[in-house]
Amino acid sequence: MVNHITLTAGTDPDHGGRWTSLAGAGREWLWRRPDPARHTVRPGDGFVDAGGLEECIPTIRGVPDHGDAWSRRWRRVGDADVVECGDFVLHRSVVHRAGAVRARYRLSADPGYRLLWAAHALLDLGPGARLHAPAGTATRIFPEAARLLDEPWPGNAPYLTGVWPAPLGLALDRFGPADGTAVGAVLTDCSDVTVTDGPDALRLTLHTDADVPLSVALWRNLGGYPDTAPYRSIGVEPMLGSVFDLTEAGRDDAAVVPADGELRWELEITMTRTTPQESAP
């Protein structure tokens, strides 16, 4: 029997707007890595990985690493948390409705402004967890995976493309235990994925009326990152765009602010739990 579970979310506007909790029926989905340095960061500082879910915008990799919003204090305006980042202002309203968590975003910037955004969710998952996405989804693999491939990485290619669930022979739908590897991937033209871990399932869906590329980024770090003191962390990251670094984004790889100067989108997250069905007496 599949049961719909009520989810709740918690955020920390004072420290980058990070989501600190995503929980339902006694399960916390967000992986956390306490680091006191997170409480003293300023714009321009190197990224401090505290886990949770980061709002990565206007880039994910590159400069500034993990974007410009994570290192800034957000302020409350009405029912929204707001962060001002020079070139843009981002409003986020997180609401709980019918058991789901819905995060609604509104970005204000000059028309034509290009950006990437990711809900950089690091999930607390066991080695048997899986990521479910439509088979055949075009999936971009990035250079940190080069040593795992059968063929040499071609020159300075920013990424290679294969098909889900095993692009270029890498079975990325399965997470597994720590094995010293780290792989970044982007499932392009994909706005709806589900993670299963035991009886529990977490579904993440992006909605927008805007003409922007929708993708899901995957960060499968099985103890391969960082070089010193590596740890296991799994990122499943609905995103606007289809690359990690805005400077590498081609014409169709980034979101573009429309003529009215506002871009809107919504992230919906739901949870279910499967329980054995009792046999009739």
Image (cartoon, rainbow, N blue to C red):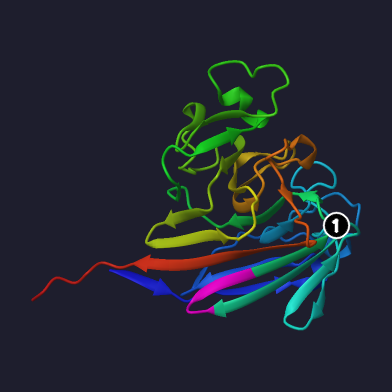
Q: Picture coordinates of residue 201 (x, y %)?
A: 43, 61
Which quarter shows the N terminus?
bottom left
In the rendered structure, the answer to whether residue 238 lies left or right of residue 51 reads left
Q: Is residue 98 magenta?
A: yes
Q: Is residue 130 magenta?
A: no
Q: Is residue 236 visible?
A: yes
In front: 218, or 248?
A: 248
Residue shown at 91% from the left, 57% from the top: 43
When the figure is inspected, residue 93 is found, relative to residue 223, above or below; the finding is below
Q: Which residues are magenta?
A: 97-103
Residue shown at 58% from the left, 71% from the top: 102
Q: Is residue 50 visible?
A: no
Secondary structure at numbered mark 1: loop
When the figure is inspected, residue 24 is found, relative to residue 191, above or below; the finding is below
Which quarter shows the C terminus?
bottom left
In front: 81, or 230?
A: 81
In the rendered structure, the answer to whether residue 76 lies left or right of residue 210 reads right
Q: Disc 1 designates what residue? A: 110
Q: How many marks?
A: 1
Q: What main secondary structure does the magenta stretch of the protein show?
A: strand
Q: Picture coordinates of residue 210 (x, y %)?
A: 64, 57
When the figure is inspected, residue 110 is found, relative to residue 105, above or below; the finding is above
Q: Picture coordinates of residue 9 (x, y %)?
A: 61, 73
Q: Label 1 amino acid? A: Asp
In front: 112, or 167?
A: 112
Q: Quadrant of residue 197?
A: bottom left
For disc 1, the neighbor class at 10 Å (few under 14, some 14 to 19, many from 20) is: some
